[in-house]
C-alpha cells in the first residue's frame, strides 16, 4: 500500500526528528530546504510498506527518491520496488554507498551539487594566507562602518524584505531564476520553520542578513545570505560574525552547493572549504 502527501508545515516535527536521527551533513536533509523548495523540486511524501520517503524531480526532469531511513533496514527487493517507478535515489551520502553493490546499481554524482563544508573556527578567525583578501575586505569594512546585528524575526520582516528586494533587483535575473521566492517565504515563516538568523544594520539602515538552521549536532547550514552591494566587505563581515556566534556550538558550517554557477563557485572556494561533500545518485543497472 502506498500513500502520497504534499509537503506541509504539519510535517515539520516528524521530518525534523527523522533528519536528526539520520545525522547527515547534506543540506538537502533539512525541513526548511524540503519545504521551501517543494514547488521547484515537486516534493511529496511517499509512505510505503517499506517506510517513509520523499519523492522529487530535478531540473533535468529526473524523478528521484530521498530515503528517510537507514538503508541497512531495507532489502534488495525494496530498492527494486522503489526504483521501478523512479529514476534514482538522491542525494545519497558516501557512507551509504556500501549498501548498493556495484554489480547491481549505477553510482554517479555531479560536482555542481556538492555541498561546501567549512570549519567554523577558521571562518570565525580568517587566519592564514587563504583569508588575506577577506581580512583586507573586513578591515576596510570596519574602517567605514559600525554594523549592528539583531535576531531575525517578524518584527524586522519588512526590513529584511527590503534587503532581499534590493538583492533581487541587482541580480538582473527574473525572480523565478533566483531563490527570491524561497528566501521570501523563509523570512515570512522564520519561527514556523525553526530558522535562526541575524539582520544587520548600518547607520540604522537594513544592510544584510543570514538565515540557517542546524543540520546535526556539529554542523550548521546557512540557507540564505543576502546583502546590499553598496557596503563593500559586508559578506565577509556577515560570514565572519555568524561563525563567531556559532563556533562554540557547531564545528562545521555548510554553505550548500554552487549549482554550477562559476562566480558562486569562485566565491565559495575563496573561503577555503574543508570538504566538498558529494551527493550520489543510485539507479538500477
Image (cartoon, helix red, strand yellow):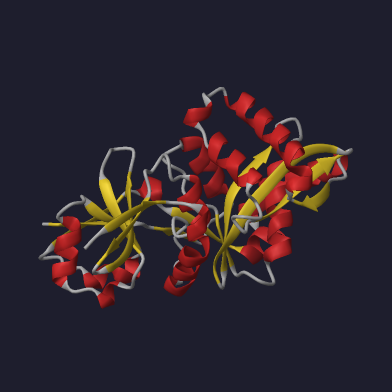
Residue 209 locus on image (x, y percent): 70, 45
- Seen from the viewer's position, the closer of residues 149 and 48 is 48
Relative to 172, residue 62 above or below: below
Where's the N terminus, which quadrant? bottom left
- Seen from the viewer's position, the closer of residues 108 and 83 is 83
Where's the C terminus, which quadrant? bottom left
Q: How many labels does the image show?
A: 0
Q: Which residue is drawn at 67% across and 45% down?
A: 133
Residue 202 locus on image (x, y percent): 84, 40
Q: Which residue is drawn at 25% across and 43% down?
A: 62
Residue 97 locus on image (x, y percent): 27, 68
Image side of residue 270 versus residue 111, left or right: right
- Please identify the quarter of the rendering in which residue 212 is found: bottom right
- Seen from the viewer's position, the closer of residues 160 and 260 is 160
Relative to 100, residue 4 above or below: above
Image side of residue 136 versus residue 87, left or right: right
Residue 111 locus on image (x, y percent): 36, 49
- Please identify the quarter of the rendering in which residue 130 is found: bottom right
* Viewer can see residue 127: no
Q: Which residue is drawn at 56% across and 55% down?
A: 272
* Viewer can see residue 225: yes
Q: Residue at x 51, y 60 (%)?
A: 12
Relative to 115, residue 225 above or below: above
- Seen from the viewer's position, the closer of residues 217 and 43 is 43
Image side of residue 12 versus residue 239, left or right: left
Image side of residue 146 versus residue 84, left or right: right
Amino acid at each position: 500500500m502506498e500513500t502520497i502527501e504534499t509537503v506541509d508545515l504539519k510535517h515539520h516535527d516528524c521530518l525534523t526528528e527523522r533528519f536528526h536521527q539520520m545525522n547527515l551533513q547534506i543540506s538537502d536533509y533539512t525541513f526548511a530546504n524540503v519545504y521551501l523548495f517543494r514547488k521547484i523540486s515537486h516534493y511529496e511524501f511517499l509512505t510505503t510498506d517499506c517506510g517513509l520517503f520523499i519523492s522529487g524531480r530535478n531540473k533535468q526532469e529526473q524523478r528521484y527518491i530521498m530515503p528517510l531511513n537507514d538503508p541497512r533496514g531495507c532489502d534488495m527487493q525494496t530498492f527494486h520496488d522503489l526504483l521501478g517507478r523512479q529514476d534514482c535515489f538522491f542525494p545519497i551520502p558516501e557512507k551509504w554507498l556500501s549498501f548498493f553493490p556495484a554489480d547491481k546499481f549505477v553510482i554517479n554524482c555531479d560536482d555542481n551539487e556538492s555541498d561546501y563544508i567549512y570549519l567554523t573556527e577558521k571562518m570565525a578567525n580568517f587566519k592564514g594566507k587563504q583569508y588575506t583578501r577577506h581580512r583586507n575586505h573586513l578591515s576596510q569594512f570596519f574602517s567605514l562602518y559600525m554594523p549592528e546585528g539583531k535576531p531575525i524575526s517578524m518584527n524586522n520582516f519588512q526590513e529584511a524584505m527590503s534587503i532581499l528586494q534590493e538583492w533581487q533587483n541587482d541580480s538582473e535575473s527574473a525572480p523565478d531564476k533566483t531563490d527570491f521566492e524561497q528566501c521570501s517565504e523563509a523570512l515570512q515563516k522564520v519561527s514556523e520553520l525553526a530558522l535562526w538568523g541575524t539582520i544587520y544594520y548600518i547607520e540604522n539602515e537594513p544592510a544584510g542578513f543570514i538565515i540557517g538552521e542546524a543540520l546535526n549536532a556539529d554542523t550548521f547550514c546557512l540557507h540564505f545570505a543576502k546583502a546590499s552591494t553598496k557596503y563593500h566587505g559586508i559578506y565577509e563581515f556577515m560570514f565572519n560574525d555568524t561563525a563567531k556566534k556559532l563556533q562554540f556550538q557547531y564545528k562545521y558550517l555548510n554553505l550548500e552547493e554552487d549549482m554550477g554557477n562559476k562566480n558562486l563557485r569562485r566565491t565559495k572556494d575563496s573561503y577555503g572549504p574543508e570538504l566538498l561533500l558529494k551527493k550520489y545518485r543510485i539507479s538500477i543497472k
